[in-house]
Image (cartoon, helix red, strand yellow):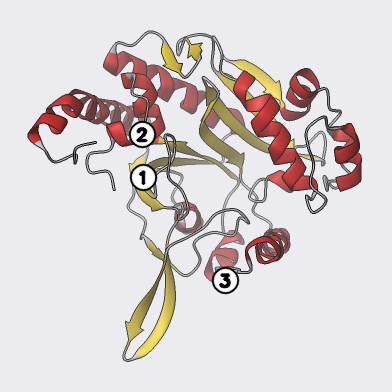
């Protein structure tokens, strides 16, 4: 493939890139009309996030000859929540974020994440936002049906809403809740015995959960209409609070279009002690699998004590632009792909 900067290649890409800008401007206008403030979170961070399977780019800060480790953030989440603690109530950012070991049709090492937060508002509000942004993207390109691989989806259709437990039962014939204890922690052997997929001897509960989700559940979501997959097991929602009706599951949702995960949102956890426990567990798992761990952002945990109840969403903006323009690869809608 010719470099993106050759005139011929750029001419073939430009229409989609310009459409990307229209989508961004329309979403920005919609948020600002609702009283949201656009923020700019720093890219350098003391901790890039504490999820076991996220990989960051590491650098160093030379402070008078003392080299201090820093990371390019994998999300603006920690910084944005500090702004909520400071008193902001509705904020958003089209953030440049960085994730190592990621490359493919739906992944890039540097990409744009639209992240927004509502303080003191119900979790349902950000789900409605995500669906509205989907419709706005379709309006800006005029594409009435989104498609990817062998799936199609009407972005204007009323969304299907299905819990993770319901989806596992429907598409994988797995009684997921029966493999969780009262705290939402998974029993590895119970899930392995209920699964029809191949399970390795060193797979833990989360590994098996992920394999079933990817192989059996995700390909069935967002077909014909958008899908809201919600109420993730608490052990798969490290930054989310538990639901009021069942402590085994959390206020976490994902939006799927044509089998593609487009957005990931939470009713945010604000208990610093519980958040620390979850971060440590995630880093223990990361060290078990990859032999490394990331530091915990102590400043973030301190801010949680001052953070109001809130909900927030991270949406893959490049994926949204890709689907809305009919592209087949996120690099087709990134101005200067790596």
* Image quadrant in which you'd find residue 177: top right
Q: Earlier in the sequence, mark 3 or mark 2?
A: 3
Query: Residue 150: where, in percent of width, then height?
Result: 50, 15
Instruction: Name the secondary structure under disc 3.
Output: loop
279 versus 331 height, above or below: below
What residue did someone put label 3 on?
Answer: 295
Closer-to-camera residue (191/60) = 191
- Residue drawn at x 36%, y 45% as measured from the top left: 111
Q: Is 266 placed left or right of 82 in the picture?
A: right
Q: What separation in Å lies between label 3 and label 2 (alpha carbons)?
A: 31 Å
Whichever of callouts 1 and 2 sits on the residue coming sooner in the sequence is 1
Residue drawn at point x = 55 percent, y = 27 percent: 255
Instruction: Look at mark 2 in the image and give the residue it sits on.
Output: 330
Which residue lies at the image location 69% right of the left edge and 57% below the top edge? 271
The residue closer to the viewer here, 139 or 118, is 139
Query: Is 193 positioned to the left or the right of 138 in the image?
Result: right
215 relative to 76, above or below:
above
Q: Are marks 1 and 2 in contact (CB under 8 Å)?
A: yes
336 in relation to 328, above or below:
below
Q: Quadrant of residue 199?
A: top right
Q: Nearer the viewer, residue 5 or 221?
A: 5
> Mark 1 against mark 2, which lies toward the viewer?
2
Q: Residues within 10 Å of mark 2 (few under 14, many from 20)?
A: many
Residue with the mark numbered 1: 111
Where residue 249 appears, as percent x and y from the top left, is 77, 38
Q: Residue furthest bottom?
A: 65
């Amino acid at each position: 493939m010719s470099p993106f900067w050759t005139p011929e290649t750029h001419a073939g890409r430009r229409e989609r890139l310009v459409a990307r800008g229209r989508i961004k401007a329309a979403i920005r206008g919609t948020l600002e009309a609702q009283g949201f403030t656009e923020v700019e979170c720093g890219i350098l961070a003391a901790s890039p996030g504490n999820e076991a399977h996220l990989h960051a780019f590491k650098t160093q800060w030379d402070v008078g000859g003392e080299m201090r480790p820093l990371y390019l953030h994998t999300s603006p989440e920690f910084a944005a929540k500090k702004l909520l603690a400071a008193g902001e109530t509705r904020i958003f950012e089209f953030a440049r974020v960085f994730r190592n070991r990621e490359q493919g049709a739906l992944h890039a090492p540097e990409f744009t994440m639209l992240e927004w937060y509502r303080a003191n508002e119900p979790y349902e509000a950000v789900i409605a936002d995500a669906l509205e942004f989907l419709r706005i993207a379709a309006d800006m390109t005029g594409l009435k049906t989104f498609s990817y691989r062998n799936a199609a989806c009407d972005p204007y259709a009323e969304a299907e809403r299905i819990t993770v437990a319901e989806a596992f039962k429907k598409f994988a014939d797995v009684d997921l809740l029966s493999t969780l204890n009262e705290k939402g922690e998974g029993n590895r052997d119970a899930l392995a015995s209920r699964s029809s997929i191949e399970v390795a001897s060193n797979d833990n509960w989360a590994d098996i959960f992920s394999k079933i989700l990817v192989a059996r559940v995700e390909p069935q979501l967002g077909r014909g209409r958008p899908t809201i997959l919600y109420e993730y097991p608490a052990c798969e929602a490290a930054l989310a609070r538990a639901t009021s009706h069942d402590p085994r599951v959390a206020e976490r949702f994902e939006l799927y279009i044509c089998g593609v995960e487009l957005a990931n949102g939470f009713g945010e956890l604000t208990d610093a002690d519980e958040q620390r426990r979850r971060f440590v567990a995630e880093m223990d798992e990361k060290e078990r699998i990859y032999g490394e761990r990331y530091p915990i952002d102590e400043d973030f945990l301190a801010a949680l004590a001052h953070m109001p109840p809130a909900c927030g969403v991270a949406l893959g903006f490049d994926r949204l632009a890709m689907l809305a323009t009919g592209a087949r690869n996120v690099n087709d809608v990134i101005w200067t792909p790596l």
